[in-house]
Amino acid sequence: MTRVVADLRGAVVDALRTVRDPELDESVVDLGFVTSSTVDGGHAEVRLRLPTYFCAPNFAYLMVADAFDAVRAVPGISGVSIRLEDHFASDEINSGVAVGAGFVGSFPDEAAAELDDLRRDFLRKTHVAAMERACRRLLADGWTIESLPQARLADLPDGAERSRLLRRRADIDLPLTPGSRVLVGDDGAPVAPDDVPLRLRFAQAVRVSIDGNAHFCRGLLATRYSESAVEEDSA
């Protein structure tokens, strides 16, 4: 029985690794936002924390809701409790997610719409950042700015850049076929050769912003929780 529970808890942690901070595009486990996860009789309980007491409630809601959905989908889990702690809107978020009320139902006096558009905007940004990383890899391998418009997914070597780009393209329903162009707009249309320098500068700015925000949030989290207690077995 102990082995079964340990395996189930491991599956819960793996599921949580698929949950990303929508702004930072990193796993909530890797960011240190998961403080504990336990499984008792098929019921999983997960506790989350964020870098500040006033982290945006819409981002916080997305992470709690995504964590709930990810853990609930684990085979063998029959019940889920996700608890956001030390946040000014934790009561509203926790109770709303628990009953599937949605963002509007959780904040009926403040929210005017669900968060689908916000999620989509951040998915597009994370794709842009992943595309910039992939292009930098191609440039390091000998491609030129002039030849980049012809680069296809099949030209990307196996590695982190390729894997991340494919995942991000899947998130926004862009083609994943080997012959698909690497450098594309949000709609999947290839970037015109004359627009490549400007598009790459924009993509670099997006990527640097995401990386910088992630570094900043890690620092805030470490300052707020100086004991640096993070999810066990998160490595």
Image: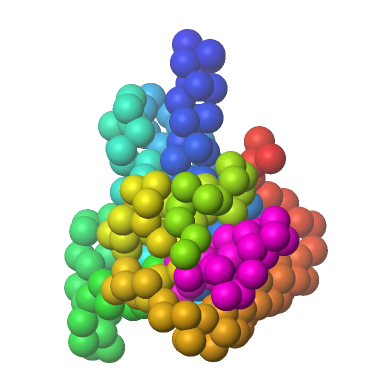
Task: Give the quadrant of residue 105.
Answer: bottom left
Does residue 73 lie above or below 186 as drawn? above
165 left or right of 187 in image: right
* Position in image of residue 191 (x %, y %): 41, 77
Q: Residue at x 27, y 65 (%)?
A: 96
Compare residues 13 and 122 and report the one nearer the observer: 122
* Position in image of residue 71 (x %, y %): 38, 41
Can you see residue 83? no
Does residue 34 lie above or below 133 as drawn? above
Does residue 186 lie above or below 10 as drawn? below
Disc count in the image?
0
Compare residues 1 and 164 and report the one nearer the observer: 164
Task: Give the quadrant of residue 40.
Answer: top left
152 left or right of 97 in image: right
* Position in image of residue 206 (x %, y %): 56, 80
Compare residues 193 and 180 and report the one nearer the observer: 193
158 left or right of 41 in image: right
* Position in image of residue 222 (x %, y %): 75, 66
Quarter of the image where the C terminus is located: top right
Q: Residue at x 28, y 32 (%)?
A: 78
Q: Residue at x 32, y 27 (%)?
A: 75
Magenta-drawn stretch contains 191: no
Task: Give the quadrant of residue 190.
Answer: bottom left
Can you see residue 116? yes
Colour style of the rendered protein structure: rainbow
Q: Residue at x 58, y 42 (%)?
A: 158
Does residue 188 lie above or below 174 as drawn? below
Magenta segment, prevailing SS (helix, strand or loop): helix
Highlighted range, magenta: 124-149
